[in-house]
Image (cartoon, rainbow, N blue to C red):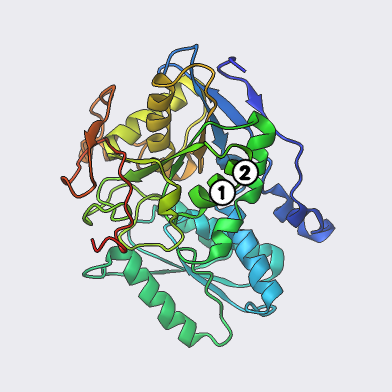
């Protein structure tokens, strides 16, 4: 268990993919991802955390909810055979929906914004998805709300089309049962779970299942600066894949024990350091989660089982996180982050601009923020 580079996989085969048959082999590639032990330089060799490498899925972690939401929509009759699937995405869910469209025979239209990386746009098109890009952010809800309004227009345009609504669809939460069961099979009872938060699906779904095995498990949420999810004001966000300028109903605020906000330069350092020391990395969410999980490992005893979900791999970020020119342009090559985060007592105490921790987790909608 202390071998830094040991990789564990599981022989669990999801029941939801078992029956797809010879003609649906793409769907069987989802799930059963390995875990990797991470230690130095995030923490010392005696401590460490386990990273669930969801980048081993064909398109990343969101293959799981994309496949499941489509399956459940079909089972309920909400999604008719051959009907068009229309969704808003910053990229990763789009890959999953393109996969689901291939498996189940649905055309897919994805609404993105100019922040989507060119490589992601090209790959989604290659996988058969129709990409629509909004040109202006919503004055209050930013790019996400602008995308959602375009989705509403397209739903009216295409009869019988179907909208998964990843931000509010409870199937997005239920889809992560398999991920949680894989983690338990690989690691046993987990003491601390570290998850990035965007739609809120995987943090809610994984934590709910893992707490059936260990009710005392702590859940730590990782957000980006400029995100409104945990009560900070909306601001321009460089990081993609985590954070939000709207309030997804799938975020289970009561499940979190604390939240950390991470800045893009800190995430870039973590992404590149992971690549250089463990030959495994990913994008903004992976870097932010690794930074926080390393801090958790440094501040807990060596017998604490810490799991961190790495949502994707590095491929879509070659023009951003791993591009020196891009990083210099955005002042992201600032060296190692501080050993400890700043601490605030309440999300409304101040606007955070770098790695910051808060033990008070609030639901901004219910609290009136």
Q: Residues within 10 Å of mark 1 (few under 14, many from 20)?
A: many
Furthest-front residue in this view: 215
Classify 100 as above or below 226: below
Q: Which residue was labeled with disc 2?
A: 212
Classify 313 as above or below 227: above
Nearer to the camera, 117 or 207: 207
Task: Determine whether, in the image, residue 44 is placed left or right of residue 80.
Answer: left
Q: Which residue was labeled with disc 1?
A: 208
Task: Determine whether, in the image, residue 146 is placed left or right of residue 235.
Answer: right
Q: What residue sits 22% from the left and 40% below the top?
A: 345
Q: What residue sits 35% from the left and 45% below the top?
A: 223
Task: Determine whether, in the image, residue 244 is placed left or right of residue 276.
Answer: left
Please report contact status of discs 2 and 1: CB closer than 8 Å, yes or no: yes
Disc on res. 232: none
Q: Position of residue 268 (x, y in %)?
A: 34, 34
Q: Dividing the picture into quarters, in which one does residue 106 lie?
A: bottom right
Nearer to the camera, 108 or 186: 186
Q: Position of residue 287 (x, y in %)?
A: 40, 35
- Element at label 2: helix
- Element at label 1: helix
Image quadrant where one finds the N terminus: top right
Q: Dividing the picture into quarters, in which one does residue 102 lie?
A: bottom right
Q: Residues within 10 Å of mark 2 (few under 14, many from 20)?
A: few
Total count of labels: 2
Q: Does residue 176 show up? A: yes
Q: CA distance from mark 2 to mark 1?
A: 7 Å
Image quadrant where one finds the C terminus: bottom left
């Amino acid at each position: 268990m202390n071998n830094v580079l040991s990789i564990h996989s599981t022989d669990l085969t999801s029941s939801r993919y078992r029956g797809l048959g010879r003609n649906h082999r793409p769907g069987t590639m989802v799930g059963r991802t390995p875990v990797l032990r991470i230690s130095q330089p995030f923490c010392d060799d005696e401590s460490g955390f386990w990273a669930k490498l969801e980048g081993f899925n064909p398109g990343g972690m969101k293959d799981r909810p994309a496949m499941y939401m489509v399956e459940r929509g079909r089972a309920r009759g909400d999604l008719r055979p051959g009907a068009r699937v229309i969704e808003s995405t910053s990229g990763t869910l789009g890959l999953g929906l393109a996969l689901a469209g291939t498996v189940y025979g649905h055309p897919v239209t994805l609404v993105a914004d100019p922040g989507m990386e060119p490589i992601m746009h090209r790959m989604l098109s290659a996988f058969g998805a129709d990409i629509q890009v909004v040109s202006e952010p919503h004055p209050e809800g930013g790019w996400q709300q602008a995308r959602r309004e375009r989705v509403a227009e397209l739903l009216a345009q295409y009869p019988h089309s179907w909208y998964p609504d990843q931000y509010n669809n409870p199937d997005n939460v239920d889809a992560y049962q398999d991920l949680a069961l894989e983690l338990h099979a690989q690691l046993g009872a987990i003491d601390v779970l570290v998850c990035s938060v965007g739609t809120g699906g995987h943090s809610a779904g994984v934590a709910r299942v893992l707490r059936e095995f260990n009710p005392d498990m702590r859940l730590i949420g990782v957000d980006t600066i400029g995100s409104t999810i945990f009560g900070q004001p909306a601001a321009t966000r460089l990081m993609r894949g985590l954070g939000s300028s709207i309030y997804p109903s799938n975020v289970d605020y009561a499940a979190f024990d604390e939240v950390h906000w991470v800045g893009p330069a800190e995430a870039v350092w973590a992404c590149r350091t992971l690549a250089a020391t463990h030959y495994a990395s990913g994008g903004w969410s992976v870097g932010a989660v690794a930074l926080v999980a390393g801090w958790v490992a440094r501040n807990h005893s060596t017998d604490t089982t810490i799991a961190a979900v790495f949502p994707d791999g590095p491929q879509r970020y070659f023009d951003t996180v791993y591009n020196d020119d891009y990083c210099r342009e955005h002042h992201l090559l600032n060296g190692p982050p501080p050993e400890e985060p700043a601490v605030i007592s309440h999300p409304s105490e101040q606007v955070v601009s770098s790695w910051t921790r808060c033990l008070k987790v609030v639901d901004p909608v219910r609290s009136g923020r």
